[in-house]
Amino acid sequence: MILKELIQDINVTSISGDTSIDIKSVAYHSENVVKDCLFVAITGLRLDGHDFVDGAIKRGARALILEKPIRKVENVCHIVVRDSRVALAKLSSRFYHHPSQEVKLIGITGTNGKTTTAYLLESIFKNAGIKVGMISTINYRYMKNILKAGHTTPESLELQKILRDMVDSGVSHVVIEVSSHALDLRRVDGCSFDIGVFTNLSRDHLDYHQDMASYYRSKERLFTDLLQHKKGPWAVINDDDPRGEILKNMANVNVLTFGINVKGDIWAGGFSPSPKGISAKIHTPYGPFMVESALYGKINLYNILAATGVCVCFGIPLDIVKGGIESLSYVPGRLQKVSSNHDIRVFVDYAHTDDALKRVLLSIKEVGQGRIICVFGCGGDRDPGKRPLMGQISGKLSDFTIITSDNPRTEDPYKIIGEIEKGIKQIQVDKYAVIPDRGEAIQYAIDLARPGDTVLIAGKGHETYQILRDETRPFDDLMVAKEVLDSRKVRSRNGK
């Protein structure tokens, strides 16, 4: 693509050099630069792309997007912009011929529920015969392609390439989990959304956003800035959440609300949780329908309502919506039941914030008869303020807590555990144990459980690894729990 055409959507401060050159590729990592490439220098959180310009030129970069002028290089076009991340997003969209304009694009944002809502929508769309693509925390997939997820929402260049591949493979609807980081770092600025979904807002990522106001404002961008590029966009908003109440009055688009406590456009009545899942009557502007879902708890009823709201915006028949919801048996690492062939219940869940842990434990309490044994830790190099809060939540809502290691990263795992322990001690709960080795902690929890009890293994969910400093080790909560349960079953048969 000719450089002059490629940059026509970008707010340029200055240009030095030939813009008639043919650009064959775009990169923002210097190692990915090849001959006739446009290199975008991004000022990152740890590294500055401007420090790698020389390497990019040596590898064949013919043009540079910069936030600050640098020494001119012959035969290399220098383009200075105010924000190279915004520039990358817009030129990536143009480079891949604006793929989001060729599909129905649904963006889901919020602290909790994004992944489950995305899975529900995928299931409903498939039930409707719609070819769907999904970009989620767990993976990116479409048709028969499954790609590993590096981030919940990929960087704009990768995102636009994936969207183009989806369009070319025949996908007509794409569901994207839109993280607060992606919104703040402008990864989705080149996207044209048809529907934005707001699930809820609670404390998370404050190591990055610093305060809740900044965290909320990043989410708000999806509705105030990015739902403006297509005709008749919709915002589907949780009206039970205080921030949702604010958001619906700010979004200058069509708004459809959902909730349980407040009877919005989509609401649930007759909610009945059970060990088998959810039973509820879903009310919509086009009439009600009964749903029986294998998903657990009120937290997932909200996700069902959110997904139903999107489908109402698209005019999908309610019997198709019902069938799609009921055909989804589980979501990886989201209150996922490990096995049903035992005398105890064991769940694996991604809950890694105090609010998420509270919601999950309350959902278990809704249907549980015995004790709740909770195993969890907190990730290192992340918001430390949530650690004692999670300790308090587990201490209040669990019958026994086992504090263990999560992904300590570069932090001392014993320091993280100590901060969680402070929270439990603040409420004077002594029914807990500290077992830093996560495998041993899971073993202890399941061995401790009596018939009728529930074990919750929280924090890592679908993850199949554990990060300790610079080492990433294989570790899967689900597989470890299955092995322990199988061992328990053998011991039970042998009378031990």
Image (cartoon, rainbow, N blue to C red):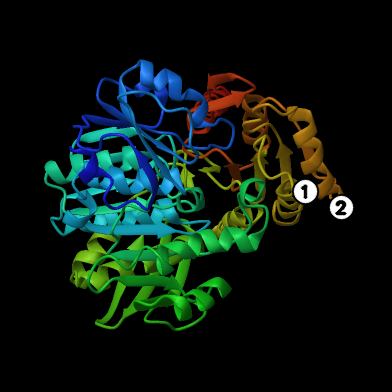
Of tags 1 and 2, the one toward the viewer is: 1
According to the picture, the residue beneath numbered tag 2 turns out to be 426
> Could you say which disc has been placed on residue 293 in the image?
none
Is 376 displayed left or right of 61 in the figure? right
Q: Position of residue 284 (x, y in %)?
A: 31, 80
Q: Secondary structure at mark 1?
A: helix
Task: Name the residue rendered at 20%, 32% in the picture.
Answer: 21
Which tag, 1 or 2, sits closer to the chain's start? 1
**Residue 327 appears in view:** no
Return the residue nearer the eye: 69 or 421. Answer: 69
What's under tag 2, amino acid-wise? Gln
Tell me if I can see residue 146 in this picture: yes
Query: Between 1 and 98, which is closer to the camera in this rendering?
Result: 1
Asked where in the image residue 410 lies, by quadrant, the reply is top right
10 or 347: nearer the viewer: 10
Label 1, residues with CA under 10 Å away: few <14, some 14-19, many ≥20: many
Separation of residues labelled 1 and 2 (CA atoms): 9 Å
Q: Looking at the image, is 142 positioned above or below residue 101? A: above
Q: Which residue is mark 1?
A: 388
Q: Residue furthest top?
A: 58
Residues tagged 1 and 2 counted as in contact (Cβ below 8 A): yes
Q: Give the residue displayed 24% in from the left and 67% down from the top.
A: 230
Residue 348 in picture, x, y percent from top left? 52, 41
| Horizontal relation, residue 109 to residue 445: left or right | left
Report x, y in % for residue 313: 26, 72
Q: Amino acid at mark 1?
A: Pro
In the image, what residue occupies the spot 70% across and 33% down?
A: 404
Instruction: Specify the quadrant of the image occupied by residue 30.
Output: top left
Local secondary structure at mark 2: helix
